[in-house]
Image: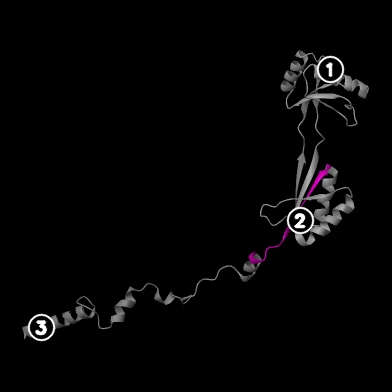
Amino acid sequence: MRLAVFLLVLANLLFFVWARGYLGMPVNPDARRLEQQLLADRIRVVARGEPPRTASRGAETASENPVATSCQLWSDLSSAEVDQIERLLSEQFADFKATRRTVAENSGYWVFVPPLASKEEVSKKTAELQQLGIQDFFVVQAAGPNQLAISLGAYRTEEAASAGLATLQAKGVKSARMAERKGRPPFNTLEIQGPEARAEALYQAIVTRLPKASPLACRIKDGTAP
């Protein structure tokens, strides 16, 4: 009797262990698989072999058809003229971008014979220079305070001009002088970039206000302008 009870208990125990999968696969193979899944009820399929969507159709169309860009370079402008054009852009052509630059030419020094009274005196003086072995000179013909002066050399620095003057004086050019030679007054340039479709309208608006001004073509970095 005791042996029968022991065998019955042992059989129940073995069945329980086998049913739990400790001795092999459980009765229901899917039961163990479901226990191993993490939050299986929250899994959602978002695509079935389809590539993800990229940029929108509008962005693709814009990249395939870029807007043509124009560039105009207006030079030799005073500050007041540049202010006038910039005001025009802000009021009527806001889709254009302007870049202002101020240009100042460097001053220098020159060695020269002061202006002479007549062309006859100039001829006489140039003959004297040639006799002293000096060939590098020219006569200033342009109207102004230096007309009929004889230029003997231009220099970037005062030290170089002083050395040039000393050389000429050593050769016997007693009338030579040295002075600062200023460049032209500072001026402004205005580079304007914007849509090609409105470039002509902008040009007409500027020349209406500044009849003497005329633009130059400038090159844009991306190469879309001439």
Q: CA distance from mark 1 to mark 3?
A: 145 Å
Quarter of the image with the N terminus is bottom left
Residue indicated by mark 2 = 96
**Residue that label 1 marks:** 128
Res. 35 visible in picture? yes
Tag 1 near tag 2, CB within 8 Å:
no
Q: Is residue 197 magenta?
A: no
Q: Where residue 8 appears, x then y in whole percent?
A: 12, 84
Q: Quick one: 120 or 225, which is closer to the camera?
A: 120
For the record, the magenta segment spans 63-78
Residue drawn at x 61%, y 69% is 56
Q: Secondary structure at mark 2?
A: loop
**Percent position (x, y) of residue 144?**
90, 30
Relative to 5, residue 85 above or below:
above
- Residue 176 visible somewhere in the drawing: no
Image vertical order of residue 147 relative to residue 214, above or below:
above
Image: 128 above or below 7: above
Location of mark 3 (residue): 7
